[in-house]
Amino acid sequence: MSAKTKGYSPDKSEKQEEKQDSATAWFRSLRDKICTEFESIEDELSAGPKADLEPGRFERKNWDRPDGGGGEMSIMHGRVFEKVGVNISTVHGTFSEEFRDKIPGANDNDGAFWASGVSLVAHMQNPLVPAVHMNTRMICTSKTWFGGGMDLTPMIEDKEDTKAFHAALEACCNRHPPHGPTPYEEAQATAQAQTHHTTQNNYVKYKEWCDRYFFLPHRNEARGVGGIFYDYLENDWDADFAFTKDVGETFLQIYPQLVRKSMHKDWSDEQREIQLVKRGRYAEFNLLYDRGTQFGLKTGGNTEAILMSLPPEAKWP
Amino acid sequence: MSAKTKGYSPDKSEKQEEKQDSATAWFRSLRDKICTEFESIEDELSAGPKADLEPGRFERKNWDRPDGGGGEMSIMHGRVFEKVGVNISTVHGTFSEEFRDKIPGANDNDGAFWASGVSLVAHMQNPLVPAVHMNTRMICTSKTWFGGGMDLTPMIEDKEDTKAFHAALEACCNRHPPHGPTPYEEAQATAQAQTHHTTQNNYVKYKEWCDRYFFLPHRNEARGVGGIFYDYLENDWDADFAFTKDVGETFLQIYPQLVRKSMHKDWSDEQREIQLVKRGRYAEFNLLYDRGTQFGLKTGGNTEAILMSLPPEAKWP
């Protein structure tokens, strides 16, 4: 993170700088925990087609954003994780006029923003181990909110994995009081003159949001088996931050469990082919539809960090 | 082609139906000539890492467009051509209100359109043989025009190939009188209050257009070594059609020559890796920027035909 970011607060409310520092520190510490855990998994592999390879280790690379802030990429090419990228970034600047209308609070602040987050995509060697995506972030304009989530993309679905993944996310959501409607939901409810159910279960809401988002309309196909996705969370900063931290800890609890369950299994050439085709779909989603990718590339983000999510190898037969 | 297309002419001018039929017949005959030539090349392979494989043959698949018309995909997985798709289609319908402003003549015709064309992308086994894209089309709204072009994407550039490819295209352009400015160019010239040079060399103009179009801004990198790209060509139908046919014939003359020149050469694993990474860039361009892909997927085109351009295998290491 560049020193320039320190002390920059587009939102001038009380303790804003402290909040930004806490969130940034959390994203960094979550990154560290994940990298440590994934390297342990690399060490543990003792059977299967890739067991003879050396355990992978993360490599770090810093980047600066010319407009303000920067980030740190961690990438590992291992024997369990064929390619995994874990990025943290803390950036600030001014949204172009074009973007201000699309981003809550940006118009009231001449487009000034600050954002910090962690994002991760893992593509696995073993086609029986699902790929995964996780991202959490805090964003400030004249408003301050959290967003993020995670979703699982099995190459060959194991219903037990899907069930365990969703159960962990449901338990996480249930550890927190129901969130109120987002500004987006409020606007929709007003437009449709409906009464909004503010007591809707967080898990149900965020699971649906995830299913809606990670979908390839041109294939009429989901990217994977879903998870949770939330955004514009600005009920109560402390509670929202606690939820966001819990999402990260839930990832650390459930995903390594799924990896360890199947990483020692043998696989066939046919299963590898299925994996490579499924990864083609993953690349299609990220390049055609992903908001973060489109947004990042159009606002001069770091191309290498943004496209770290692309699969190490993919096929369109 | 669906029988429904027959006789459909959004432009009611004289001989319009005859023109549409001539163009459609040409695109089909060009497709046939290309497929025959490519299958001959498959038969000719006599050395190199893939010579033991069976020569490839095209497979045909028809599709209907629910709104009107349809197409025919030809795909070959061969020993020279790792994956090559040659699509023809003849479709008609009504552009959505959203699209009408973007397409010449569509607003004067309640969005009615007819379009026919041939498009081709070849991804080669041998990293020393360049990949290629070629497309020509005739489009009618209340206006009628031609568009198309071709561009070469070497995996490892051979300057002689680049030179020969551009020389063939320059010769093709020079066989035709200089084209006047397109409506787009006229609008630009008016906006900039400049006098437009209608005598600009076709090749220079279309080569620049191609370089501008096939560019990945997020990589600050060209997709390949260029070629020609033209659109909105509506000077004189007979002359424009003759040019469009010549573009197709030029493709048939030059590309097979480049393939035969290098297809017997041996290659290394390292060269294959370079090829797979370059193909990743090709997929990025097609999914992030290609107008045809974006347009096709958003207007309910045939996904399989549109995405036939994606590489059989690609890497993002």
Image (cartoon, coloured by chain):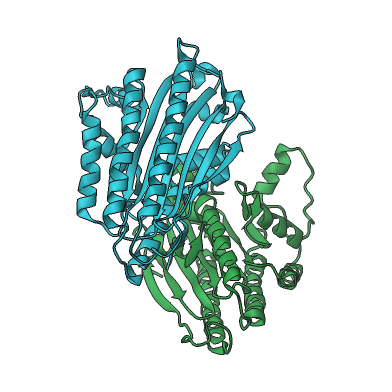
Chain colours: A cyan, B green
Look at 46% across and 29% down and name the residue there.
A102
Q: Quadrant of the N terminus of chain A?
A: top right
Look at 45% across and 74% down and name the residue there.
B74
Q: Depth check: A306 or A245 in front?
A: A245
Which residue is farthest top?
A14
Q: Is residue B280 above or below residue A167?
A: below
Q: Quadrant of the C terminus of chain A?
A: bottom left
Q: Residue B60, percent across and down?
A: 41, 76
Q: Residue B196, percent across and down?
A: 77, 47
Look at 46% across and 27% down and name the residue there.
A25
Q: Is residue B224 left or right of residue A14?
A: right
Q: For residue B187, what is the image quadrant? A: top right
Q: Residue A263, percent across and down?
A: 32, 57
Q: Is residue A166 left or right of residue B260?
A: left
Q: Depth check: B151 or B284 in front?
A: B284
Q: Is residue B198 above or below residue A5?
A: below
Look at 65% across and 70% down and name the residue there.
B247
Residue B135 visible from this viewpoint: no
Q: Is residue B223 above or below residue A242?
A: below
Report the number of discs. Answer: 0
Q: Residue A244, percent across and down?
A: 35, 29
Residue A207 visible from this viewpoint: yes
